[in-house]
C-alpha cells in the first residue's frame, strides 16, 4: 500500500501556514489489511480509519457517485484498484486535491499549485455539483484565505450559482450545514463567507432572513453606512476583529433580522424591529439546529440590543428587568456576551469602528450592583416563597437606583 498526505495539510504547507490536522489517503489496500495493522474503523460502511497511535484519519482511496438527493445519496466505491488520481478528482477544490508522499513529492493532476499561486478557489471537475455542501465550503475557504488575496474563480462561482438555483441546497442536513457555518464564522473575516454566499444566490436559500437585509436603509444619523446588510457584515467583521466567541458572532449575524420586515413606507425607521425579529431568529436557529447557547444568545441580543445601547438612560426598573431576563445572577458569562454583541453592533458602523462604548462598563456595574443584594438577611427576616422573590427584587431595585444615582453624580 502507498500512503499520501492529502487535502488541507498539503495545501497549508505550500501556503506556509501551520498545519494542524493531517488527512491521509491509502492506495492499494483493503479494509482487512488496515484492520490487521491495528487501524480502527470510523464507521461501519465508510472506508475511513483512525491510526492506532496518532489518531489521524486514513481513508482508503475511493470514488464517489451520486445516486440521489442530499448526502445520503452517495455511493462510495473503495478498492485496492482505485488510483490516487481517481481519489483526488472527487475533491472540491484544486488546492485541496493535491497529495504528497513521504518524500514531499507532489501529485497535482488538477493544477492546485498553479491555483495557489494565482490565489484562485477553483473546482476540480463538474462533479463538484454533486454535493451542495461544497457551496458552503468554498465560501468558508474564501473567508479563510481572503487575507492572502484568494477569490472564487468565475466558473466556480457560476457553478455555485446553478447549484443554489437548483434547489439542491435545501437537501443539506442541518448538521452538515452548521458545521461549515460555525467554522466559517470563526474565521478572521467571516463577513466574506456571507458575501460569497450572497453573490452566488445561496444566502437567499439558506438564510433568506439575512439576505433580505440588503437594500434596507436605516437612519443615516446612527448608521452612516445606511444599508442594513452592509451594517450586519460590519458587525460580524468587528466581532472577528475583537476575537469574539461563536455565540457572539452568531448573535451579531442575526441581531437585526426584524429590519427586513419593516414596510417600505416606514423606512428608514424600524419600529419594534427587536421584537419582530424574534420569530425570524428562531426560524434560523432551528433550521440549522444551532447549539443551545448560540440560539439563546441570538434571541436575547435580538430582543435587547437597543436596551444595551440605551443603558445609561434606562430607568432602574427597566434595568432590573433586563438583568432578570438574562438571569445575570446565575449566568454572568451570558450577560458578558450580550454586552460584547451590543458593542460590536455599535462599532459595526461606517467610520465608528473605534468609538468608545461606555454602556459596557455601565451594564457590568449594574449587574454587580444587583448581584450584591444578599438573600440571607431576607431569609432571616422570615420571607419565603413568592414573597421572598418580591423582597429580593425590591432590594435589587434599590441597589440599582443607588447605582444609577452614583453614576450620574
Ligand atoms: P481544514 O483546514 O478546514 O480542515 P481541509 O481541506 O483539511 O481544511 P477537511 O474538511 O478536513 O478540509 O477535508 C479534507 C479534504 O477532504 C479536503 O481538503 C477535500 O479534499 C476533501 N473534502 C472534504 N469535504 C469534501 C466535500 N464535501 N466535497 C469534496 N471534497 C471534500
Ligand atoms: Mg482537514
Image (cartoon, rainbow, N blue to C red):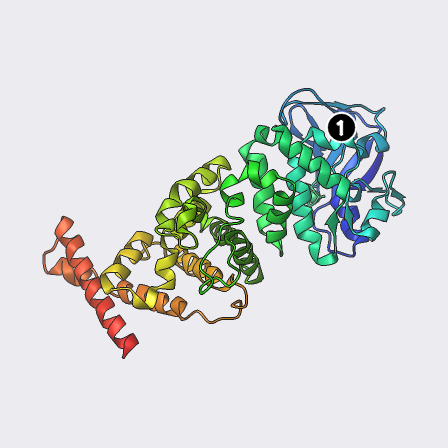
Tell me where residue 137 appears, x and y as whole percent.
66, 41
Left or right, 282 with reference to 374: right
Tell me where residue 326 appears, x and y as whole percent.
33, 53
The answer to whether any part of residue 132 appears in the image is: no
Name which residue lies at 78% across and 48% down: 120
The answer to whether any part of residue 250 appears in the image is: yes
For this orientation, the residue located farthest to the left is 382
Q: Quadrant of residue 381?
A: bottom left
Question: Would you place residue 270 above or below residue 340 in this image?
Answer: above
Tell me where residue 226 appears, x and y as whole percent.
51, 58
- SS of the residue under disc 1: helix
Q: Quadrant of the N terminus?
A: top right
Q: Quadrant of the C terminus?
A: bottom left
Q: Residues within 10 Å of mark 1 (few under 14, many from 20)?
A: few
Left or right, 162 with reference to 102: left
Reading the image, the residue beneath label 1 is: 36
Left or right, 407 with reference to 159: left
Q: Nearer the viewer, residue 97 or 235?
A: 235
For this orientation, the residue located farthest to the front is 265
Tell me where residue 105 appears, x and y as whole percent.
90, 45
Question: Would you place residue 89 above or below residue 361 in this image?
Answer: above
Q: Quadrant of residue 306?
A: bottom left
Q: Quadrant of ligand 2?
A: top right
Q: Nearer the viewer, residue 71 or 122?
A: 122
Question: Would you place residue 42 above or below residue 9 in this image?
Answer: above
Name which residue lies at 44% across and 57% down: 337
Amino acid at each position: 500500500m502507498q500512503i499520501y498526505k492529502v487535502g488541507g495539510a498539503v495545501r497549508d504547507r505550500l501556503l506556509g501556514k501551520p498545519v494542524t490536522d493531517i488527512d491521509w489517503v491509502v492506495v492499494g489496500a483493503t479494509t482487512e489489511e488496515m484492520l490487521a495493522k491495528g487501524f480502527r474503523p470510523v464507521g461501519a460502511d465508510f472506508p475511513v480509519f483512525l491510526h492506532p497511535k496518532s489518531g489521524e484519519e486514513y481513508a482508503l482511496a475511493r470514488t464517489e457517485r451520486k445516486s440521489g438527493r442530499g448526502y445520503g445519496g452517495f455511493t462510495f466505491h473503495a478498492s485496492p484498484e482505485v488510483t490516487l488520481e481517481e481519489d483526488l478528482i472527487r475533491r472540491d477544490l484544486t488546492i485541496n486535491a493535491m497529495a504528497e508522499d513521504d518524500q514531499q513529492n507532489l501529485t497535482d493532476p488538477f493544477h492546485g499549485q498553479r491555483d495557489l499561486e494565482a490565489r484562485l478557489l477553483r473546482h476540480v471537475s463538474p462533479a463538484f455539483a454533486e454535493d451542495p455542501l461544497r457551496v458552503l465550503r468554498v465560501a468558508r475557504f474564501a473567508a479563510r484565505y481572503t487575507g492572502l488575496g484568494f477569490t472564487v474563480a468565475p466558473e466556480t462561482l457560476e457553478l455555485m450559482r446553478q447549484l443554489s438555483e437548483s434547489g439542491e441546497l435545501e437537501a443539506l442536513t442541518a448538521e452538515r450545514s452548521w458545521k461549515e457555518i460555525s467554522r466559517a464564522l470563526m474565521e478572521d473575516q467571516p463577513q466574506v463567507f456571507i458575501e460569497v454566499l450572497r453573490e452566488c444566490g445561496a444566502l437567499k436559500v439558506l438564510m433568506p432572513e439575512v439576505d433580505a437585509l440588503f437594500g434596507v436603509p436605516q437612519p443615516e444619523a446612527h448608521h452612516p453606512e445606511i444599508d442594513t446588510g452592509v451594517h450586519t457584515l460590519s458587525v460580524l467583521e468587528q466581532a472577528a476583529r475583537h476575537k469574539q466567541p461563536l455565540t457572539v458572532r452568531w448573535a451579531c449575524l442575526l441581531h437585526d433580522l426584524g429590519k427586513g420586515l419593516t414596510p417600505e413606507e416606514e423606512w428608514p425607521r424600524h419600529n419594534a424591529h427587536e421584537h419582530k425579529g424574534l420569530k425570524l431568529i428562531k426560524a434560523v436557529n432551528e433550521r440549522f439546529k444551532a447549539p443551545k447557547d448560540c440560539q439563546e444568545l441570538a434571541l436575547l441580543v435580538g430582543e435587547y440590543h437597543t436596551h444595551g445601547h440605551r443603558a445609561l438612560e434606562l430607568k432602574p426598573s427597566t434595568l432590573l428587568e433586563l438583568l432578570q431576563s438574562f438571569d445575570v445572577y446565575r449566568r454572568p458569562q451570558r450577560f458578558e456576551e450580550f454586552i460584547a454583541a451590543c458593542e460590536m453592533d455599535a462599532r459595526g458602523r461606517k467610520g465608528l469602528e473605534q468609538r468608545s462604548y461606555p454602556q459596557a462598563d455601565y451594564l457590568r456595574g449594574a449587574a454587580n450592583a444587583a448581584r450584591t443584594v444578599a438573600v440571607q438577611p431576607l431569609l432571616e427576616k422570615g420571607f419565603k416563597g413568592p414573597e421572598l422573590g418580591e423582597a429580593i427584587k425590591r432590594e435589587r431595585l434599590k441597589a440599582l437606583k443607588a447605582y444609577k444615582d452614583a453614576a450620574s453624580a
